[in-house]
Image (cartoon, grey):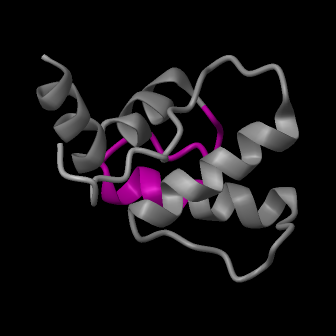
């Protein structure tokens, strides 16, 4: 892989142990998909709204809640697909 490859995007693990770290990674993954919040520390209502928007676009059940299906979808980014191909 060329030195320009960047594999720093962490995979989300669900269920999670560290809620602060999970929220950071969740916001990063949502941002990579074009869903962002301008607040550095969004409240629960903001997160639920952002997750619902993502779920609607991805045709997932719109609950605004974190689920295994949501995490799987967020981890299935183009960058992750590329990593799986390169590793094989």
Q: Quadrant of the C terminus?
A: top left
Image quarter of residue 80: top left
The vertical placement of 38 against 19, above or below, is below
Q: Quadrant of the N terminus?
A: top left
Residue 65, image x, y percentages: 65, 39
Q: Is residue 72 visible?
A: yes
Residue at the (43%, 62%) spot, across then down: 32
In the image, the segment drawn in magenta is 51-66
Q: Is residue 77 visible?
A: no
Q: Residue 58: say if magenta.
A: yes
Residue at the (42%, 42%) spot, across then down: 74
Residue at the (72%, 51%) spot, across then down: 24
Residue at the (69%, 55%) spot, across then down: 48
The vertical placement of 5 against 80, above or below, is below
Residue 2, image x, y percentages: 18, 51
Q: Residue 69: say if magenta.
A: no
């Amino acid at each position: 892989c060329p030195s320009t490859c960047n594999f720093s995007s962490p995979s989300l693990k669900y269920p999670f142990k560290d809620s602060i770290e999970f929220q950071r990674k969740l916001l990063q993954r949502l941002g990579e998909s074009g869903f962002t919040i301008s607040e550095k520390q969004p409240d629960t209502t903001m997160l639920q709204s952002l997750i619902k928007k993502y779920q609607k676009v991805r045709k997932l059940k719109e609950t605004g809640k974190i689920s295994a299906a949501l995490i799987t979808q967020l981890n299935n980014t183009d960058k992750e697909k590329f990593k799986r191909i390169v590793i094989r």
